[in-house]
Structures are given as structure tokens and as C-alpha cells.
Amino acid sequence: MAVTGSAGVCPVCEAPVLAGDSYCEACGHALGAPACASCGAAAVDAEGYCERCGARQPTGRDHAETVLERAGAVALTDRGLRRSRNEDAVALLETPDGTVVTVVCDGVGSSPRADEASAAAVETASAALARGVPHEEAFELAGRAVAKLATSLDDAPACTYIAAVAGRDGGVTIGWAGDTRAYLLPSGTPLTEDDAVETGEITAWLGADADDAGPHVRTLPPGTTGLLLICSDGLWRYLDGYDFPTSGTPLELAREMLRHALSSGGQDNVTIALIPLGEAHG
């Protein structure tokens, strides 16, 4: 199929091309590609990388915020300062009966297409939990969705996983695998333990190459109050000695924690979800 345009040069190899050419005969680049946000060349491939300068193109996941007005819960995710893409994913939703569901997944950076893994897991698990299925089943369904992305065990996208379900009746359950964490604010009490060894290498994840172990599941005592914080390591790696903010709306608190992570180096993607518990919920 020919593309319209005037004669010129290929934006990748600068070989001469003619008007109506679909591909550069010299290097095979598809002409008429989107322009790169970094260098301006019309050389962005189907996977979102510039074939000329190599830059990953911005996406809607670079920074996103979600607010549930009735429940007061919020979630935000940000690419951070050092990563070319955001491989975290987050879902935050409220069911008709007022139950709040959040799922946060952090793509394993050493795996291919980690952003696809986290997106698939979040979409699948949040939908399942909203239907009322238990954490173990939602985790299994999310694992299947991520495993389907693999073409082989050497090409297996992977992600960590944490999910929380907070009912209007005060019941709160958390399920996780990997090093994505939960805390109870304002005290900052940790509610999860990492699936990781001393070197920081995680020992549990979702993916075709993952073990068949299920998630850890924790139920908070009835009547627990405060803010439930779910976050990826882009935040918690900077929490040692950190005084959590105590005033402001949940969105203002989440933005303040994001600023802290970025000002501390922003080495990784940052995802934060905050759910008011007890009387503040709803």
C-alpha cells in the first residue's frame, strides 16, 4: 500500500525515497510512521520505539490518576525519572454495593514486555475481584492472562501482584505475590512481607515461568481505620525514615508521596493507591 507524501529521504537511514513508497528500499523502514517525541523523525515503530534515536514514546501510562469520589479512594501511577516506560499498572474501582477494589502490578524489568504483563494482570484480577471471587481465584485468573502472553519460557512477560478489597462493612482483605507492598497509615505499619531474598531478587511473580504457588492473603481486623496504602517499589524503596503526610485529601497525600519518590531519585516507576478505611470509607 502506497503512502502519500512528497519525495524525500528515509527518516532512519536517509536514503532517497519516492512519493508513494511504502517502505525504504535501503533499510526496510515503514514510511509514514508517527513522529518521535524526542528527535522528531517519522520513525516510531509499532512497539513505540523510535528507530532513529531509540527513544520510547510517551504513553497514557506515563502519568495517570484515578479518583473514586464516593469512596474517597485514589490511585496514581507515574513513569518516574529514570525509566523509558511505565511498567507498573493499577486498577481502582467501586462496585455497586460500595466495595472498593484495587490491584497494583509491577512489571518484572528483566522480563520481556513487562508492561503488557502488568496491564493484563490488573485488568483480569480487578474484574474478578469486583465480581466477588476470592483472592486465590483472582490471582490464578491473572496468572493465566499473563502466561498467555508468552511465546516460550524464554519469552515470558512477568509482574508482581497485590490486590486489596475493602467493603463498606469494614472488611478488608489483601492478597499479594512479589515485592509490591501495603501499609496502614498514618502510622505506616507494614501489612505485607516481600517474596524476595536479601539481594532483592523476587521469588514469586505472575508469568509463564512462575511457580504454581498461590498468593499470600491477609484479612485486617474488623473496625480497622486509617488509610490503606498499596504501592510499588518505586515508592517504598524511599520510605525508610519517611514521615508520611497526615493532612490533605487522599489525592493530595498520594501526590505528596509521589513528589517524595521523585525528589529522592525516581529510579523506578511509582504507583500509589490509597483507600480510606472505617468511618472514612464512603
Image: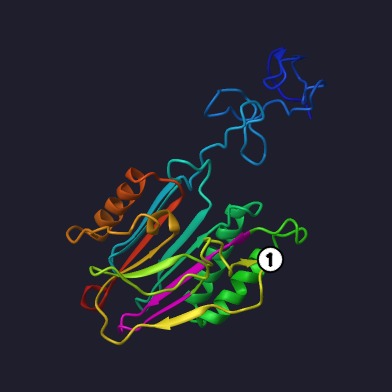
Q: In front: 278, or 105? A: 105
Towards the viewer: 35 or 236: 236
Residue 88 in the image, given as x and y percentages of width and height: 50, 55
Q: Is residue 242 visible?
A: yes
Judging depth in this view, the residue of 217 and 198 nearest the camera is 198
| Quarter assignment of residue 253 | bottom left
| Rendered residue at 25%/54% (across/down) | 252
Residue, far front: 198
Residue located 51% across and 62% down the image: 105
Task: Categorize mark 1 by other alpha carbons within 10 Å: few (<14), some (14-19), many (20+).
Answer: many
Amino acid type of the residue tagged 1 in the rendering: Ala
Magenta segment includes 159: yes
Q: Main secondary structure of the magenta part?
A: strand
Number of numbered markers: 1
Please tell me whether residue 155 is drawn above or below residue 85 in the rendered image. Answer: below
Give the quarter of the image for residue 181. bottom left
- Which residue in the rendered view is the most extreme toward the left? 247
Residue 150 location in percent, x, y?
A: 72, 60
Rendered-image quadrant of the N terminus: top right
Magenta highlight range: 158-175
Say which residue appears at 56% left-offset and 62% top-offset: 201
Q: Which residue is mark 1?
A: 147
Q: What x and y, as percent, mark residue 157?
A: 65, 58
Q: Element at badge 1? A: helix
Residue 3, percent from left and from top: 72, 25
Q: Quadrant of the C terminus?
A: bottom left
